[in-house]
Image (cartoon, helix red, strand yellow):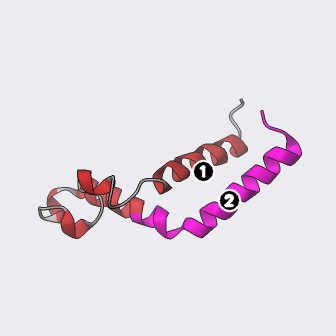
Amino acid sequence: MGFSLWNIFKAGLLFTNSIMILHRKRFLSKYGLDDVNNMGCNPSERPFQVQAIGLLQAVHYLKIPVIMANIVAIVFELLLGGG
């Protein structure tokens, strides 16, 4: 597996898929990452946590484009072969 743009795209897509499967109420609420308002403190006290919540919300907002990127990746892998 070489260092190419295609492999970087696939790695980013796998990372995005792993974020998308995190359930907001069952998993993220245990760690206080479900909503900025439910942090239990002032958001300016924990800027990293606010950024993580923003990333999680942005990924869930882009569900349809990620699904389309998955389809494109699967089709390319089937046509051109993996590896």
Disc 1 marks a residue whose amino acid type is Leu
The residue wearing badge 1 is: 13
* Residue 17 screen position, x and y as percent: 55, 52
Asked if the residue under mark 2 is in contact with the one under mark 1, i.e. CB atoms within 8 Å, the reply is yes
Q: Residue at x 71, y 39 (%)?
A: 4
User: Where are the magenta residues, as a range?
Assistant: 57-83
Q: How crowded is the residue under tag 1: few (<14 C-alpha within 10 Å), some, or many (20+)?
A: some
Quadrant of the rendered image containing residue 44:
bottom left
Q: Residue at x 23, y 57 (%)?
A: 47
Q: Residue at x 46, y 52 (%)?
A: 19
Classify residue 38 as left or right of residue 72: left
Q: Is 11 inside the magenta-drawn segment?
A: no
Classify residue 77 as left or right of residue 62: right
The residue wearing badge 2 is: 69
Identify the secondary structure beneath mark 1: helix
When the figure is inspected, residue 3 is found, relative to residue 70, above or below; the finding is: above
Which of the two discs, 1 and 2, labels the residue nearer the N terminus? 1
Classify residue 9 as left or right of residue 73: left
